[in-house]
Image (cartoon, rainbow, N blue to C red):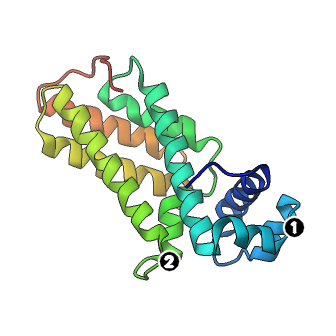
């Protein structure tokens, strides 16, 4: 999307907070416009539809998460990704925005479904890349991604705040079984 006007940025910021906190379907364009201090007309002029705004919210969230992950993975081991997850989840009490969005719009022709699938594919490839960089089989990266997804859901929806630490311990056992000590590397 082209550079947004200040009003457009306000709408994205308001929608992002509201969608994450209350859900996509529960938040209407009236509330988004009111929270942003704009009008519905401005929302539709800038984005064309609520669906396009949802897709942009998730695209921006993916960018923010990736930046956070890559920054915090510097100098950490492969298993350190679970420490980064725990750090991220301190401020994300509603869990994974992509899982939450998929629960509401998955299986439809909603434009945000593509964004959700791309983010999950990116994470899977990130883990595969970590495994390869450590000289491990790519399948281990796929398995670590499964641990990551499970830890994310359990830490929030499951009420198990220690899930990332437990996933880290499981990852370290898997890494050890493959002959890799959990040493620090570039990891990002």
Check residue 105 in the rendering and tell me which mark sits there, or answer none: 2
Residue 14's quadrant in the figure?
bottom right
Q: Is residue 168 left or right of residue 85?
A: left
Residue receiving disc 1: 34
Residue at the location (80% across, 74% down)? 40
Residue 117's quadrant in the figure?
bottom left
Residue 159: x and y, percent? Answer: 56, 56
Q: Nearer the viewer, residue 22 or 163?
A: 22
Residue 7: x and y, percent? Answer: 79, 55
Q: Nearer the viewer, residue 68 or 176?
A: 68
Q: Quadrant of the C terminus?
A: top left
Mark 1 is surrounded, within 10 Å at the Cα level, by few (under 14), some (14 to 19) or many (20 or more) other residues, namely: few
Q: Can residue 148 be seen in this view?
A: yes
Q: Element under label 1?
A: helix
Tell which circle, 1 or 2, labels the residue nearer the N-terminal end: 1
Q: Distance between the residues labelled 1 and 2?
A: 24 Å
Q: Nearer the viewer, residue 64 or 131?
A: 64
Residue at the location (41% across, 36% down)? 82
Q: Is residue 29 above or below residue 177?
A: below
Q: Can residue 173 be seen in this view?
A: no
Residue 98: x and y, percent? Answer: 49, 60
Residue 21: x and y, percent? Answer: 70, 61
Residue 56's quadrant in the figure?
bottom right
Residue at the location (45% across, 42% down)? 164
How many numbered marks appear?
2
Q: In this view, does 28 lie to the left or right of 71?
A: right
Q: Quadrant of the N terminus?
A: bottom right
Q: In this view, does 174 lie above or below 123?
A: above
Residue at the location (35% across, 47% down)? 123
């Amino acid at each position: 999307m082209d550079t947004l006007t200040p009003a457009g940025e306000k709408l994205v910021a308001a929608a992002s907070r509201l969608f994450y906190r209350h859900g996509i379907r529960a938040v209407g364009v009236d509330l988004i416009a009111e929270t942003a201090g704009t009008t519905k007309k401005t929302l539709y002029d800038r984005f064309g539809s609520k669906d396009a705004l949802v897709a942009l919210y998730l695209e921006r969230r993916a960018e923010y998460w990736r930046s956070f992950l890559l920054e915090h993975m510097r100098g950490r081991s492969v298993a350190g990704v679970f420490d980064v997850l725990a750090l991220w989840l301190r401020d994300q009490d509603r869990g994974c925005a992509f899982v939450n969005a998929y629960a509401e719009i998955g299986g439809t022709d909603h434009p945000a479904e593509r964004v959700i699938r791309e983010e999950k594919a990116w994470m899977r490839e990130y883990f595969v890349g970590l495994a390869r960089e450590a000289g491990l089989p790519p399948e281990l990266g796929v398995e670590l991604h499964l641990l990551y997804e499970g830890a994310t859901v359990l830490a929030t929806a499951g009420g198990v705040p220690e899930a990332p630490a437990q996933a880290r311990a499981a990852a370290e056992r898997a890494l050890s079984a493959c002959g890799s000590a959990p040493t620090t590397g570039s990891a990002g």
